[in-house]
Image: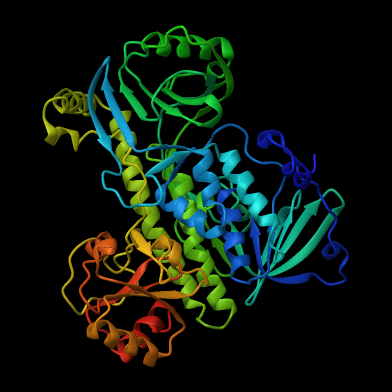
Amino acid sequence: MNAIAASAAAPIDYQNLRYDYRHHPDQDAATPARHPVVVVGAGPVGLALAIDLAQRQVPVVLLDNDNKLSTGSRAICFAKRSLEIFDRLGCGERMAAKGVSWKLGRVFLQDAQIYEFDLLPEEGHQRPAFVNLQQYYVEGYLAERAAELPLLDIRWNHKVVGVEQHEDHALLTVETPDGSYRLQADWLPACDGSRSTVRQLIGQESKGRIFKDRFLIADVKMKVDFPAERWFWFDPHFHRHQSVLLHMQPDNVWRIDFQLGWEADPEAEKKPENIIPRVKALLAASPFRDAEFELEWASVYTFACLRMEAFRHGRVLFAGDSAHGVSPFGARGANSGVQDADNLAWKLAAVLRGEAPQALLDSYAREREYAADENIRNSTRATDFITPKSELSRLFRDAVLQLASSHPFARTLVNSGRLSVPATLHGSTLNTPDSGDFEGRMVPGAVAADAPFTASGGQRNWLLRSLGADGRFAALVFGDGAAAETSLRALAEAEAPVSVVRIPLDDAHALAAQRYDARPGTTYLLRPDQHVCARWRSPTAAAIRAAHARALGKT
């Protein structure tokens, strides 16, 4: 079925959607055609990166080795930061509308709830803490957005089978149903997953830790009146000495993760006759013990936390699972991959336009390697807590769980998966150190916080919606008086290509002022990926020019 024709029908079965292979003129070229960027892998990360580049007016070719999207739920928890990135890519609203929004989690020990937590206890954010949305929807919506962009050329059933590195380009060998052809790419982002072909072709590998445990992931379709929350059981009576995780997804599909143990037979555990009794046992412990259900998809995983030593190798840049992998506890895999794409796109565009040196791409590698280490650290701690590997570790975990029901301090030690938040890039070489006194979380390297915002015409909006629509740096200037005018003059004199957003210090913008510790004239410089790179109480033109140059890797 043609994807464009399918998009006119409703509903679309994204799991069974097939995209047409098309013979491209590049396949008949006498010499290999050359493109500024060739992205490998049309998963969430590759699609997000390709869309971002095309929106920045960079022509991009996206190659995928087959012609279909993911099957099964796979990555389902997409964090607020990912939704904010998807907003900028043109499909965040659709994902938020389809997804199941949630922010409350409950933790159980055996049959008793020991505590609950709220992931977004404060108001004043456009997007929820998380939405649960099956990966095939995310990929489908991104693929449809990609098809709207004239500078984005998606080639399905074009498999990369060879990569040769040269000083100023990479040479690819691509296999298709019509035979092989060659392509040249100025830059080659590899977003082709945990078994990355590109990584293997250039002789690289990911290293880390494989956890000796197995988990059954089951998608179950049933209509029940159950809250949109994350429920996690330690040692429930219906699945003794193991853990269980329950999530609601769209279309009355429920995601259930059963810990199985290392000795479990993966093929046997995937059989319906073994899954259905487990689901019935879980339901019997709930208020809807008689609910009817059907099994939609299942898989058994062994989890690993690992990464490549370096994310840049000459003209090849790695992002998403091709660069790093984590266990799913905390929803850090797909979310961190989308943030990789967000970090890389503006830097590639700046280098290709001649606005920044190639060294800016080294900052991509360093920043996202740091973020990967943070995700791996949190994921490893969660996995070690959930699946203790020694009797001493198990005794500690069980004692913490017992205490958590009545002692708040113990709840900080319970780890059923510290949920994904964007990394604050504290040590980035693109940051300009503070010259004034500030409080709060909006330090250089942090992702800009959202808040309600009123545009100059009086239209109610959100702050992040007002940033970076043109793909440039942005400056936030707070206040309306003389101090603000001084900051605005400094921005004008700096003559840097920066979009200016003025934020009054009034009741309507009190949350923004609080989150940015703003006074009259306070100014923040934001990168195109909405990370803070500098802030001042009263900037000078010279300081702004220097910070802008530093954020482009020029100093």
Eyeballing the image, is 395 above or below 339?
above
Position of 6 relative to 521 (above/below): above
State the image coordinates of residue 493 (x, y, percent, origin top left): 37, 93
The x, y position of residue 431, in whole percent, is 33, 74
Q: Where does the image place residue 32, in percent across and percent down from the top left?
A: 80, 69
Q: Give the left or right position of residue 301, taking residue 396 as reference.
A: right
Compare residues 165 and 338 and report the one nearer the observer.
338
| Circle count | 0
Instruction: Please report the residue visible at 41 percent of the width from the left and 27 percent of the height from the top.
Output: 213
Q: Quadrant of residue 482?
A: bottom left
**Quadrant containing the C terminus in the rendered view:** bottom left
Quadrant of residue 36 within the rendered picture: bottom right
548 over 175 or under it: above or below: below
Please give left or right for residue 14 compared with residue 25 in the image: left
Q: Residue at x 27, y 88 (%)?
A: 486
Q: How is the image coloured?
A: rainbow
Left or right position of 5 against 328:
right
Query: Quarter of the image holding residue 106?
Result: top left
Judged from this view, the residue extending furthest toward the front is 458
At x 45%, y 62%, the residue is 465
Where residue 49 appears, x then y in whole percent? Answer: 57, 59
Q: Nearer the viewer, residue 108 or 207?
A: 108
Image quarter where the N terminus lies is: top right
- Is residue 10 in view from this perspective? yes
Q: Is residue 323 visible?
A: no
